[in-house]
Amino acid sequence: MRDRGLPLPQSLSAYQRQAEEASQVETVPDPPRLDGLNRKPSISPAAADYVPELPVGYSARMNRRKALLIGIGYRKHKYLNVLPGCKNDVTAMFNLLTSELFGFPQDEVRVLSDELNMLGSVHVQAPTRFNILRDMLWLTEDVGEGDSAVFFFAGHGDFIEDVSGDEIETGVDQCIMPIDCLPEPKHRTGQTFKGVPPILDDTIYERLVRGVPAGAKVTAIVDACRSGSVCDLPVMHGDDGVKYRASGGDPPRQRSSPHKGAGGFVLFSGSADDQQSIDMTIATGRGNGEVESFGVMTRSFVDAVQEMAMHRCPETYDGVESWTYGQLFQRVRELVWERTSSILPHYIEKQEPQMSTSHTFDTWQAPFSI
């Protein structure tokens, strides 16, 4: 079993040597921002009254389709554990999106991975911080009403101390780790970074959520530890109903005011902010006993979507719009629970996938689509 969080090093001295080596890495500047994004990030509104509902006329029919798929195995990383399943996660998502089921054009799908030859002729670039931030902007650039984009990340996730003051509920920022992220020998509390820092939830919100125009939408799937609120979305959906995340950011906005990300944004994350996301193995089917690793969340999401399309509703299937968001999310959680229960000891808390959104809407009425 491998989890997708940050491990403590075997010894502090080894950690210090790694940090000293990391200090020699040149800091890479962030890519330039698109016009309109050079503002202080606005995080989650504090109450339901300040979160606008998804527009009634929002169309589930999508025109242009773009995707950014990131999978990092960290095979040559000096600090982070190897995650062998991430390259298979990206392959599974690539095959799902470019299949007849969703019809994403291959030239509108960007792939970042440290396995550069994983998809044959498909061009793959390294998942550095610079490349990830650059392609986040590309993902929502030039999309408009009726367009759809998908953001997928499989890799290490964690949390660090919040220094901006916007995380008033938890005091920490969720983050994802690019391949060139090299931390100092301080774990979480007061953590700083030599070389390249992680990508914080504040940055993901600013570059992805804020960039979604009215009438368009982004679907994000993040298979990483502690990723429940990694996009800093204001509306959390769970077994006990809807929760509105509090924030210490900008003053609350009236319901009639437009959300700064005017389009719809939906996040399916692998686990809650205090939980681990783990890998699983499945047989390759070649009859030689070989197995492949996948993230439990990714494999369950792909299986649930395919089940939705092929088994539950073949007579009504039309663009995977036969299940609602609530039904799909429930099925993903069922699959994750079944699979983690067979892997994890009973005394370890099982991972629970999370769903959060930028707007309020009835997830049991709105048909799922990508």
Image (cartoon, rainbow, N blue to C red):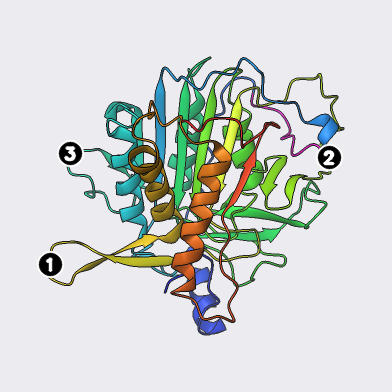
* Mark 3 and mark 1 residues within 8 Å of each other at the beta carbon: no
Mark 3 vs 2, N-terminal side: 2
> Dot 2, how many residues are within 10 Å of its Cα: few (below 14), some (14-19), or many (20+)?
some
**Mark 1, residue position:** 287
Amino acid residing under circle 3: Ser
Residue linked to disc 3 = 121
Q: Position of residue 166 (x, y in %)?
A: 79, 46
- The residue pinned by badge 2 equals 46
The CA span between labels 1 and 2 is 54 Å
Residue type, label 1: Gly
Disc nearest the viewer among 3 and 1:
1
Specify start and end residues of the magenta stretch as a single range. Answer: 37-46
**In the image, what residue occupies the spot 58% across and 60% down?**
352
Residue 347 in view here: yes
Q: Which marked residue is nearer to the observer: mark 3 or mark 2?
A: 2
- Is residue 61 rendered magenta in the image? no
The x and y percentages for residue 13 are 53, 83
Q: Between residue 117 and residue 45, name the one nearer to us.
A: 45
Of the two numbered discs 1 and 2 on the same chain, state the one appearing first in sequence.
2
Please name whichever residue, 48 or 252, is drawn nearer the observer in this view of the structure. Answer: 48
Quote the CA–CA distance across marks 3 and 1.
27 Å
The quadrant of the rendering that contains the C terminus is: top left
